[in-house]
Amino acid sequence: MPFESKKVFASLPQVERGVSKIIGGDPKGNNFLYTNGKCVVIRNIDNPAIADIYTEHAHQVVVAKYAPSGFYIASGDVSGKLRIWDTTQKEHLLKYEYQPFAGKIKDIAWTEDSKRLAAVGEGREKFGAVFLWDTGSSVGEISGHNKVINSVDIKQTRPYRIVTGSDDNCGAFFEGPPFKFKFTISDHSRFVNCVRFSPDGNRFATSSADGQIFVYDGKTGEKVCALGGNKAHDGGIYAISWSPDSTHLLSASGDKTAKIWDVGANSVVSTFNMGSNVLDQQLGCLWQKDHLLSLSLSGYINYLDKNNPNKPLRVIKGHSKSIQCLTVHKNGGKSYIYSGSHDGHINYWDSETGENDDFSGKGHTNQVSRMAVDELDQLVSCSMDDTVRYTSLTKRDYSGQDVVKMDVQPKCLAVGPGGYTVVICIGQIILMKNKKKCFAIEDPGYEPEVVAIHPGGGTTAVGGLDGNVHLYSIQGTSLKIDEKTLQAKGPVTDLAYSHDGAFLAVCDANKVVTVFSVADGYAEHNIFYGHHAKIVCLAWSPDNEHFASGGMDMMVYVWTLNDPETRVKIPDAHRLHHVSSLAWLDEHTLVTTSHDASVKEWSISYK
C-alpha cells in the first residue's frame, strides 16, 4: 500500500448549551463513545490519543451505545436512522439499519442479552420504539408521553423494565416483554433529562432540569428517596451515571459542578467544581471502571479525580467545530501540528503522542482562515475577526500587543524571509514588515484569493478569482507588480512554492493543478488532472519532488512532480467531509484535516 493511516486525532463531542450529551461506555471497559456531526468517535479510555472514527451516517449523529456483548454499536441520527454495526473489525460493517420513527433519535438502550433495543426521541406521532435487534419487529410500545422523550434505559436483569424521561416533565415505567406502559412518574417539575438503571437492576434514578435526582425501586418503580433532599444541584442536571457496583451515582449539572452521591446513605461524597465560566457547565458524564468522565460545554472531556475534586486528572482538548487550516513546525526537536477552527480556536498537537493543548489568553473570536510560521518561530494567523495575530510558539500565549487590525476581512496570508508578511483581504493586498502594515494595493483590478512568498524572498505570487496568478516583487516597503501573469485553468483556490523555490504549484476550481518552473521564467512545467471537484488546498513535500492536493471530492492525491501519472490516491481521507488543509511533517508523513474537526496523519510511500 502506498499510503496507510498512521494516527487519528479525533474531534471533541459536539455540544450545545442546555442539551444533555450522552457518552457511551464499553462493556469491556476499554473505550468510550460520543458523536460529533456525522461521526461516531470511539476513543481508548486509558489513552484517548488512540481513536477510531465511524462515518457512515448521512446525517448528524446524536447518540451511540455499545451492546452489552461488546461486539456491536447502535447509533442514531437526526433523521431517525438507527444503524447497528460491528466493532471488532476496522471496517465496521453494517449489520442492520432501521428507522424506528421519523425524527431525531435522542437515546438508545439495549437489553443485557443484546437482543432487543429501545430508541426514543422526537418522532411525529410516536416518540419511542422497542424492537428485536435482528428483525426490527416490535416487542411492545413506548407510550404515555406527549412530548419529546430525552432518555431511556432498560433494566439489565430480569424481569425486564424500561424507564423513560421526557420534556413533558414526567417519567414513564414499562414492564415486559412485550413492553406495556404501567404508570407515569410525575415527581419532577421540569424537563426530565436522564434516566438510568443501576447495573444490578435494584434501583433507577431520574435527573431533571429542576435540579433534582429521584431514586426508585428498579422492579416496582416505587420512589425510594430524593438525593440531597429538595435540591441535588443548583442548576439543571443533564446526566447521571451509576458506579459499576451500583452503590454510587455521578451527576453532571449546569451549575458547573459534578457530584458523586452515596445512594444508600443519601449523601454527597465529593463535589467537583469545574470552573466559573459558562463553558464549564457539565452536560454529560460516564462512570466506567475507575474512570469518572464529565463533559463540559466547551467540549472538553474531564477525567475527574476522587482524591482531588478541584483539579481533574486530565482534560482532553481538541476541536469540536470544523477545522479550516493547519500548519506544522518543529520546536525543540519535536514536530507540532497547529490547527485553527471555525470558532477561532487554535490547538497544537504533538505529532508523535497526540498530546494537545490550546494557547493561553484571549485569541481569535471568529474563524481562523490561514496560518503560517515565520522565521522568528511565531505563528502568524488571520481570521474573520479582521485581525492578523503573531503568537510566539515558545511562550504559547496570546498577547495583546501582537494583534494587527485589518480594514477589511483577511482571507489568506504568507510569510517570507526578512520579517515580511503578505495578507490578502477582500479586494486588497497588504504588505507587512515586522508586524506593521507598510504597503497596500487597494484595488488590484481583480479579486485576490490566495498568496505565497518565494522561499528566497523578493517575489510574491497572488492567485485571483480571475483565473490568473499575478506576480509582485517585494522592494523595501512596497510591492511592485510584474508584467507577467500566469494562467491557471480556473479561479485559483490555493498556491504554494516548493521549499527549494524551484517550482510554483497552483490549484483551481476547475479541478486542475498546474506547476510552473520558476527558473524558466515561470514556464508551465506540468499539469495534473485527477480530482472530480474543486481543489481547495495543496502542500509540497520536503523532498520537493512530490506535493499533495485535497479537494471537495473528499480525495487527497499525492503527485510526483515530473510524472503526473504516478500518484498516490487517498480516497475518503475524511469520509463525507472534504479536506480543508494539508501539511507535511516529513517526506513520508502527510497531515490532513477537515470539516469533521479531526486531524489525521498518513504514511506515504513511493514505489
Image (cartoon, rainbow, N blue to C red):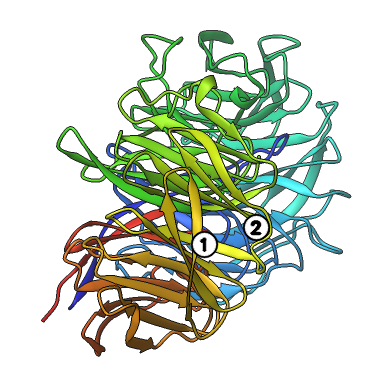
Residue 205 appears in the rendering: no
Label 2: how many Cα within 10 Å (few below 14, some 14–19, many 20+)? many
Relative to residue 107, is residue 494 depicted above or below? below
What amino acid does circle 2 point to?
Ala
Q: Is residue 48 left or right of residue 25?
A: left
Q: Residue at x 60, y 46 (%)?
A: 367
Q: Residue at x 16, y 65 (%)?
A: 543
Q: Is residue 497 left or right of residue 204?
A: left
Q: Is residue 58 left or right of residue 212?
A: left
What amino acid does circle 1 point to?
Val
Relative to residue 172, is residue 397 depicted above or below? above
Q: Residue at x 33, y 27 (%)?
A: 290
Between 202 and 528, the one lying in front of the other is 528
Q: Residue at x 62, y 41 (%)?
A: 15
Numbered tag placed on residue 119 in the rendering: 2
Label 1: how many Cα within 10 Å (few below 14, some 14–19, many 20+)? many
What whole-number distance in Å separates the C-alpha atoms at marks 2 and 1?
Answer: 48 Å
Quadrant, the N terminus:
bottom left
Relative to residue 125, is residue 41 depicted above or below? above
Between 69 and 438, the one lying in front of the other is 438
Residue 53 appears in the rendering: yes
Residue that badge 1 annotates = 450
Figure quadrant of residue 581: bottom left
Between 282 and 170, the one lying in front of the other is 282
Which x, y percent locates residue 456?
Answer: 27, 55
Q: Is residue 19 left or right of residue 49?
A: right
- Secondary structure type for disc 2: strand
Callout in the foreground (2, 1) = 1
Q: Earlier in the sequence, mark 2 or mark 1?
A: 2
